[in-house]
Image (cartoon, grey):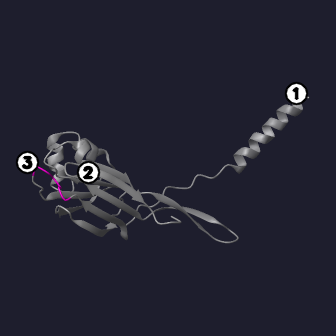
Amino acid sequence: MKRFISILIAGSLLMLTACAAKQLPPPEWTYEKEAIRMHIKADDQLNLDEGEAHTLLLCAYQLSDPNTFNQLSNDQDGLYKLLECSLFGDGAAASKRMIIQPGQDINMTLDRADGARYVAIVAGYYILEKDRMVKMVEIPEYTEKKGFIKKTKTRKPAPLSVELVLGPQQITTISTSTPEGK
């Protein structure tokens, strides 16, 4: 009886490993036209200082690796470097500089840069604090299924929609979504 149970357990384990889902290779993070959509809504009292609203410098970075960006965002000199909106070595795939007016409502699309896996936002508020002015989101991925008889699955980067709300003294909201089915 013991031998039968041992064989049954071994057989069950063998079947479980045979039926386990095969790990798909990571997606290829290649360039894609208009893969990032951004909606930016600025408060009427944007970048409030001494009771007056001011324009705001906004940098949108596309990153292949967030490590250098995170290190720069941890101190004041690094925050000023990020506000230059220029590529800063390892990890930065693209950057876009924008000047945002109080009350402005902008819809725009960006091409996803080759290698980009994250979108990071740096907003040049008067109060220079990381928690108020720096946000990052990961570009999602989805599994594409093809074939009727022989089915294949491939992991791919998904299009990304970013909703960004700029408040009087900080980024108040950043949310993301992807199109249905992706």
Q: Amino acid at mark 2?
A: Ile
Q: Position of residue 165 (x, y in %)?
A: 28, 56
Q: Position of residue 154 (x, y in %)?
A: 55, 62
Distance between the alpha carbons at the discs numbered 1 and 2: 65 Å
Question: Which one is in front in this view, the residue at disc 2 or the one at disc 3?
Answer: 3
Q: Nearer the viewer, residue 90 or 170?
A: 170
Q: How many marks?
A: 3
Q: Amino acid at mark 3?
A: Glu
Looking at the rendering, the stretch of residues picked out in magenta corresponds to 44-51
Which residue is rendered at x = 88% and y = 30% of the image? 3
Residue that badge 2 annotates: 171
Mark found first going from the N terminus, 2 or 3: 3
Which residue is rendered at x = 56% and y = 55% of the image? 24
Q: Residue furthest right?
A: 1
Quadrant for residue 54, please give it: bottom left
Mark found first going from the N terminus, 1 or 2: 1
Q: Position of residue 143 (x, y in %)?
A: 54, 61
Q: Which is the main secondary structure of the residues drawn in magenta?
A: loop
Q: Nearer the viewer, residue 167 or 30?
A: 167
Q: Is residue 46 magenta?
A: yes
How many other residues sit within 10 Å of disc 1, few (<14), some (14-19) or many (≥20)? few
Distance between the alpha carbons at the discs numbered 1 and 3: 82 Å
Distance between the alpha carbons at the discs numbered 2 and 3: 19 Å
- In the shown orientation, is residue 164 left or right of residue 148? left
Regarding mark 2 in the picture, which secondary structure is present there? Answer: strand
Q: Is residue 132 above or below residue 144?
A: above
Q: Nearer the viewer, residue 60 or 49?
A: 49
Query: Can residue 154 be seen here?
Result: yes
Residue that badge 1 annotates: 2
Residue that badge 3 annotates: 50
